[in-house]
Image (cartoon, rainbow, N blue to C red):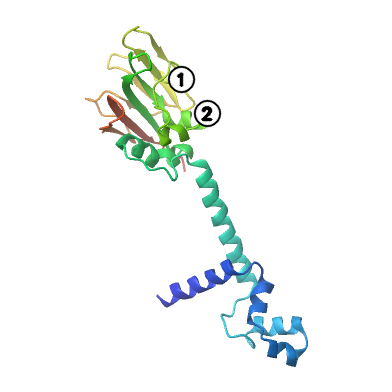
Amino acid sequence: MEEDNAAAALNSIVTEFHSYEDFLDSQITSLDLYYLEDEELARHLVELGYRGSGEVLKREEFETRKAAAEASRLNKRSQRQTLASTGKELKDNFLKALAKREEANRSARMTSIIFIRDHNAQGQEISGYIDYSHRLKFEDFEPYFSGKKRLLPRSTDLSFYNWETQISTSNASANYQVIAENSTGLLFKNKRDRKILNVDPKAYPGDNSSRTPLQSDLYTQVVIYDHITRRKT
């Protein structure tokens, strides 16, 4: 507990002062300057612990902690800028599930496939499989998380079917190859680890894969298939 408190105190110092010189100056009194008559000497004595009433902090440790704090700040800012779901008030289960998976899909630790069945703007029933990671790279998802747009399958996604026109398409993505000519139904082969993801609800989804049906107020049917790519060591 004492170590945690000490670390917190040092981090507070790093945050408060722009430079190490500013920190040293905060420890110097007007009386010190009166007797020493040398600001640099006063700073040196503070650094050595002979003057000052606060924490003794070496320049190297200050600069190391300052760099770490700045890196953390930039990383958080970058993440806020990158994640479209950040700061959004999400009420629907589907949007919450997408937000939970967004960072992992952007960093390629996970490649999720989203199955959606609903109606398009013309009232036609459509369904399809969407490579979430692939879409995130080429499309702004902020409107989806904000509720301004609805995420629907397209003819350019992994798989698309219009139940009224009976138009059917399938396309490979950056992450998956589509295996359509298969007796057991539609299969997706991950291009990175070559594992097969089976979307048949009655079948085992495959190694490192999982199937999550979701109850959504926004869509007729939603299922998310998550695949964790096993990294080679």
Q: Residue 50 at x, y = what percent?
A: 64, 88
To which residue does mark 1 refer?
A: 172
Neighbour tally class for label 1: few under 14, some 14-19, many 20 plus, Cα within 10 Å? some
> Outermost residue toward the bottom?
35
Q: Which mark is residue 138?
A: 2
> Is residue 192 visible from the viewing direction of this image?
no
Q: Residue 19 at x, y = what percent?
A: 66, 68
SS of the residue under disc 1: loop
Marks 1, 2: nearer the viewer? 2
Observer-nearest of 79 and 121 = 121
Q: How many marks?
A: 2
> Is residue 66 visible from the viewing direction of this image?
yes
Label located before the other in sequence (1 or 2): 2
Q: Residue 227 at x, y = what percent?
A: 37, 34
Tell me the distance, in whole angstroms, between the alpha carbons under discs 1 and 2: 15 Å
Q: Amino acid at mark 2?
A: Phe
Query: In the rendered view of the protein, which quadrant contains the N terminus?
Result: bottom left
User: Position of 189 compared to 223: left or right?
Assistant: right
> Outermost residue toward the top?
165
Observer-nearest of 7 and 144 = 144
Q: Relative to residue 119, is residue 35 depicted above or below? A: below
